[in-house]
Image: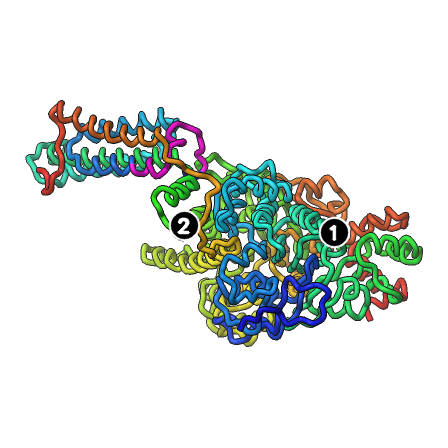
Amino acid sequence: MTLFGHYEVDSWLRRRNPTAKLAAHLVLSLLLTAVFDPLTPLTFLVAALALGRLGARIPVRLFLTALAPVALLGASLVLSYALFATGSRSAWGPFAVTAQGAIIGLSLAERGVAIAAFTLVFVLSTDPTSLVRSLVQQARLPAHIAYPALAAYRFLPLLQDDYETIRLARRLRGQGRQRGPLAALRERVDLLVPLLVGAIRRAERVAVAMDSRGFAARRPRTHYRLTPFEAADAWMLAGTVALGGGLLALSATLGSLRLWLGGFPT
Amino acid sequence: MAHAHPPVGAAPRQPILCAHDLGVRYLTRRLPVLRGVTFGIEPGERVLLAGPSGGGKSTLALCLTGLIPHSIDADLSGAVYVEGTATASAPPGVLAERVGIVFQDPTSQFTMLTVEDEVAFGLENLGVPRSAMPERVAAALRAVGLEDRATWRIDRLSGGQQQRVVLAAALAMRPRVLVLDEPTAQLDPRSASEVYRHVRMLAETGEMTLVVVEHDLDKVVPGLATRGLLLSAEGRVVADEPIGAMLGSAERAERWGEAGVALPCSVALARALGVREGSLPLGNEAAGRLLAARPDLQKLLRAAVGRGRARAPSGPVVLAARDLWQQYRGPAGHHVALRGVSLEVRAGELVAVVGANGSGKTTLLRALSALVRLERGSVVVDGVDLYRAGPRQAARLVAHVFQNPESGFVANTVADEIAYGPRALGWRTDEVARHVETSLDRFGLRGLARANPFTLSQGQKRRLSVAVALVLGPRALLLDEPTFGQDRRSAAALMEGIRALRDRGLGVVVATHDIGLVAETADRVVALASGTMLFDGPPHEFLANDGLLAATGQERPALARLLAAARAYGADVPPLVSWCDLAASVEEGEHDAVRALRG
């Protein structure tokens, strides 16, 4: 979370209604989950990159750094499908690989990367506060759920600091010397206890502080800022549907499109 | 249970806040924290709430805001009334509009991410129309001097600015009463004064009723608090009187001192100088006038200068750090925490590390015990390079006590906690037992051997963490903010223990915001700003350099500020004298009046 915590560049997408953006993101991701060929998710991925660059002004470098781990995971997926999936095999060095398997792996991997890319565009173009305000105003999320969630989001970097401090304090006591995966695992679990004790105490303090500002009143709340749903947001949603449909149609025209309609494709 | 009117006597005005036979017991504790507390506060009064640690000050603050019993589970007997409404029966939220509160910890009081959103949060909760909000937010931010920070992210502000945001958030709701619960306990001295400067400006309007919980009376006297309410360790009100009366006479001041409250510097000095007749001066101006009129006292102060100054420690160097560079890498770029810091600590020497919040004090201490990765540099203790020797050796040679003692606890009982290190090193069972016994006695933990470390009081936890750190017989002891969150008396007792360890030949390094500790205890001061060492030398040189103090987030000690006021009145007094100087001067029997200090 701290990775993206400070990316605040004004852009067309940043000015869109967060709930509308979330809906658009869901539409594209759902479409992607139904696709089962290597070309279609690739077109979605290209669209996500273009959207990120042009719509949200995300630097290409940031995009690549953030997607690299997902891509790596995808590469391993391609490899394992090539090696272990059923299908006719051919020799590739000392290994017997299946091209069919590799293609399935590739489409799965591309799908994952494409969804991650859309998520990235959403996260980097959305201010957390606006998202919470919009979820309360447009999606009717109850305030007593939304605002504590925002307070908890503020905690993440603090928790990271706490974890580091406890880890160091324990290393000082001689922990971290035992060898073996079991001892290491036990130490991690032991670390969680003081971390949780600290986190709970802090959460209690924040809850009390929120109540001291009248959060417990549960009166009809007003809003310091509105997150209006504007014409541009409607256009964005329409554009999203058109984009998704268009890409599927393009892929179908090229004869590549395969949709998952229940059952496992072979 | 709720009466329509509070039971009060013939007060000239109706009390705005009123406690009637108030008792509070937390569900997890056997004994109540407050018992039979009764008082009334009139509009515009400014009340100091003082008492020893664990004496129920914060609990009382929570009761006054109605957060007990509405948000925190506790058994409440008696009643608290806010403008005649019993808090227990008031609908939640109604009280938030009347009583605002600022807590101690800046990191756990915010809901929102930016300054203006946070200040507006309370207004949103109250259902204030949107059109009215911008003006109220702006006015609240102006009152705390943060109008140019409205759109900033809160986590990019300093701790002092964050506390001012909390203050603004409370003010925006236009409360009739403001409760401040040690609002500056976690701040460096300069940020602390800045917060109190704004509180004083608020008090000057005369409209706000204030209740301030504070250990350090110099922050609230004179000019802020008009009345003092003293709680005992058992949670009873033992004194409730106008500030002038309570501190103006020697016997009464005694009672506050005994409760672990640090008396205002002016009162303490007058008592130390043997001023017995008349009332004691309250505040630097009064003390300045008194000194200007008394050449005998001026002479005494001049004679005391440097008397208690630490002898230059001549022991061998036990810890030598050379050219330490450390940086944190993050996606948002990297942050250099230490820039070429070098430092030597001798056996029997106490070095204080000072600097503003975020200046690198904690990182320096961690580097000295080989806990962080260095870009460059070395730490040698007793001839062993810690970064080459590995964590086991490092832990044996250097004891390190973290700011939060709990973070290092690994065992289920106090005895096991002390035995943990020796056992891990494979000491013989009888030897471990012997060391545990010695430690229990030395650190006043006898009787708690079987208690769970997490259930101890803050002071006990701190003593246990020092005991744990010392059991392996290290050459150097590092302490991060050891007096943090403790009242004067427990802090003084702890520092007494640390001085004793130093005198037995340990090299001690203390990172601290406590400028009094620096002035009274340190043999040397190391001052950091943004990871660079700006000063390494004797405390009296550091404390006399205003530029250096400002650059490192420090302020002159209270006594130096008082002497400056006296000089402004024409008194011929030195710019800097420490309490140690005065005490040492007494020891040498220089002056009858000063000798009285001892007796």
**A15 drawn magenta:** yes
Q: Is residue B590 above or below residue A44?
A: below
Front residue (pair B501, A40): A40
Image x and y of residue B535, in percent: 69, 42
| Amino acid type at mark 2 | Ala
SS at circle 1 = loop
Which residue matches tag 2?
A143
Which residue matches tag 1?
B557
Magenta stretch, residue numbers: A6-23
Front residue (pair A93, B554): B554
**Based on the displayed image, in which of its 4 quarters is residue B462 positioned?**
bottom right
Front residue (pair B55, B19): B19
- Rate crowding at label 1 as few (under 14), some (14 to 19) or many (20 or more) other CA atoms within 10 Å: many
SS at circle 2 = helix
Q: Is residue B18 above or below residue A248?
A: below
Mark pair 2, 1: CA separation: 47 Å
Q: On what subunit does the disc labeled 1 rest?
A: B
| Amino acid type at mark 1 | Pro
